[in-house]
Amino acid sequence: TVVDVAVEVPKEFFQEKDYLDHRYHVKRMAYLQVLQQNLESADWVASSVYSTHHADVRKPCLLVKAKKPGDVCLRVLLTIPVHTFPSARLHHEKANLRNLEIQNDERLPSPHYNHSIIEDMFMDEHIKYLRGAAETAEYYEDACILLKVWAAKRGLLGAPDGFNGFVLSMILAYLIRSGGKLSPQMDAQQLVKGALSFLSNPATLKAGFTATGVKQNVASWRSMFPFIFVGPCGYVNIGARISRSAMDEFIHEAARSSSLLERGGRTAFEQVFLVSLYPAMRYDLHVHVKLDRSDNTAVGSCEGDIVSWRNHERTIHDLVTKAISNRAKLVRVQHQPFEQDAEDETDLYTVWVGIIFDPEHALRLVDLGPSSDNDKLAKEFRAFWGDRAELRRFKDGRICESVVWDSIPFNKRHHIPALATDYVLKRNFSSTETVEWSCNLLDPAMGMKESDSKESSPIALIQCLDRLAKRMKDMKEVPLRVVNAQPISPAFRGTDPFPPRQHQLAFGAGIGLGRSDEQMPVCPKTLDVVVQLEGSGRWPENSMAINKTKAAMALKIAEQLRSSYATPTIVTEEATDVLHEGYVFRLHINSSASGANNEAAEKYLIKGAAHAAVIATISARFPVYGAATQVAKRWISSHMLAPHIRDEVVELIMGYLFLHPGAVDPPGSREVAFIRFLDLLASHPWNVLPLFVDPEDEFTLADMQNLEKKMDSSDASSMCIATPYDTEGDLWTQRGPPGVVLKRAQALASRAAERLKVLLQGKNRMGHNLSGSFMNNLLLGDASAWESLFTPALMHYDIVLKLRRTALPFPDQALF
């Protein structure tokens, strides 16, 4: 628990001109040192250390820990009386640093420097303003706590350039006292809901507002501060430290939360105020920009108007925003907490960049620039992009400058935004040493190779199946006509980590020989297909007889394919394998159109087809879903949980994250989807609450409550995932995982989520205390960083059998 304590320095301690050239800050530091010496001699003080106020090295403060109780920490902040210095001399347009540049015979103003002094003068007035709001609105204090909880759950508090508890309390007080925006009669939840709705409008925050009670022109403030909130005194901009990227982040999060609260629902309050949404779970792309510390402007110096690394943040934000353009909804840039740099012995320090993608534009292949007719803009575009810029004629006749990324391999198109960021920063920002990004973090775990092509993509597989289905539908010499062929294998919907490739021996008559120089796998993977037959009233009633008849039907289909098209087939009583265009399609006959007996005998086949249809819909709606599910399946398999947690369960859990993202955007990259998957697997109370995967919102409140009651029974499965085709929620979980396996999976997921969080956020943890020696050594750019997530823990097993890689049917899929 941290409690702020203000200590007022007497006016007599300062001289008349001490507001110039950091004299005030030097004397302030001297006073703080004497204060620390006296505090350390007190019996109740356990320790006292220096810290910085909002990471501003010229505004130190004291953190004093008491002996009893041991969990209380006092943060001592120094203030000064209101009339210590003339307020007019500390106006934001005044120049009080004589080392600043002179332009047009006038010295540049020092608004941030002036603010660092004048905010100490009017702290008491701000406290009185907050007390006035508390007296006006009964639930103001509760609303402040709730609003701070909302911000803390998203990692918005504590950033040097972001919102803090004081700013949020002042904004809430302003909305109550300004009249018409929030009513003092509202309860805490209504106040926060109204505040989020008001602040989610970009025009509101960017226009700025004042708490002086009189209309005041903020135009002069706007040229110096991104966020303007003039305090009740009329001289202090309470939001002076807030950067443009922090303001955009706040608006984005407020809009998402406000929208969810407006829609309502059973879990709306929980999703907005109780779920932790740290930056690793909110941003699709994480970029770590390492800058040269030897540059004098990169070491946190404060000789200028603003702490130097704030200029680096602004420069990087502007460059990345221009490079990404409409690929992103939000770009957030933040320097790592300055206190941690002292432990870093390297000559580099890191700026973290978080990007939330716009899924419609994130992976486009062309960045369109200005027309060739506009020489000025065209020169600026070429200067910005350098060798990447080229002049192109497009199909509509336009001739424009552009940047084209079509040389990127198909399986690495998700690298395009990061490559654009990397190139622009290295070209236009000389302090950049290295740029590390998250979108290639999981590539080694997925076995991605340059040779991967579109041949095994879901579209190519479905097109191949369509050609086979057309042949089967055209067959005349079969007892029952083939009506449809529905794909049900994960490869058809893009969720198979290793979709089958064309096998040289699966073309028939030696057609495929010599097609590829790659190593031929021992056996091809099969693709399951449900073949729907037309209805008939002549089917037997016994389930065994039905299966025998279906086998005979499959045999007849195989004979026709061999005789008419020379298609190789392998027939068994359980299924029929058809070798077509290098792939092996395993046909499962579906005769459910012929009556209830047939439908009962084919329950799992029908449910599997329904599951495939639901997942295919999700995959088509969210392009990242397939790749994210592949990563999740790979992780489940690497920790030897695949025999207990079926692929269908993994697909449904991942589908829930996309269909019901809560107070955040649906995942825009496989990394953020993966960490949300791990977090959900680790934190959801599976033995108490079902998970509802409901693409069309078909479940009613009564349905949900009834299923929750069934979870209380002793024979309930350890996991319950309800879907429109499985309203009981136990189709894929009634045989597992056992409770002990589920607990192990949750423990592994929790540990992996913590490690991935550190990899993505780096040292920039935004208020989240992540302990553990392994976390301090992990870096996003390490070639083996992914191994910490996928290496199985074998120490708990009694017997471990290690197989020769050459003896495996698919040796390329082995991780270690």
Image (tube, rainbow, N blue to C red):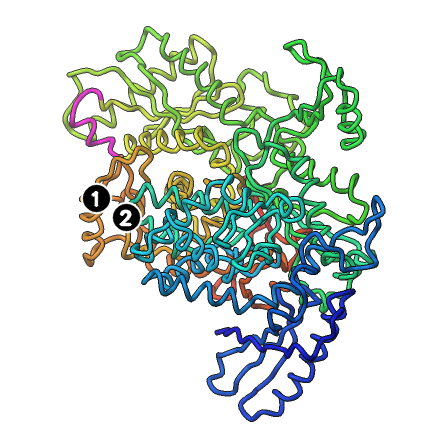
Q: What mark, if any, has residue 775 been given in the picture?
A: none
Q: Residue at x 36, y 55 (%)?
A: 684
Separation of disc 1 and disc 2 at Cα?
A: 9 Å
Q: Where 769 sits versus 587, above or below?
A: below
Q: Nearer the viewer, residue 277 or 805?
A: 277
Q: Amino acid at mark 2?
A: Arg
Instruction: Work out whether residue 202 or residue 150 is closer to the camera in this orientation and state it.
Output: 202
Q: Pointers 1 and 2 in contact (CB under 8 A)?
A: yes
Find residue 352 and report its horizontal and vertical position in percent. Answer: 65, 51
- Where disc 2 sits, the SS reads loop
Q: Image height check: is 668 above or below 268?
A: above
Q: Position of residue 752 (x, y in %)?
A: 52, 57
Question: Overall secondary structure of the magenta stretch?
Answer: helix
Taking depth in this image into account, of 273 and 698 the one nearest to the observer is 273
Residue 39 at least partly seen: yes
Q: Residues within 10 Å of mark 1 (few under 14, many from 20)?
A: few
Residue pointed to by mark 2? 266
Looking at the image, residue 45 lies above or below residue 289: below
Q: Which sits earlier in the primary sequence, circle 1 or circle 2?
A: 2
Q: Position of residue 300 (x, y in %)?
A: 74, 61
Does residue 494 appear left or right of residue 518 in this picture?
left
Q: Which element carries disc 1, helix, strand or loop?
A: helix
Give the extent of the magenta segment: 593-603
Q: What's the amino acid at mark 1?
A: Leu
Residue 800 visible in rendering: no
Q: Which residue is mark 1?
A: 701
Give 314 or 782, whichever is nearer the viewer: 314
Q: Residue 286 vs residue 250: left or right? A: right
Q: Is residue 187 left or right of residue 511?
A: left
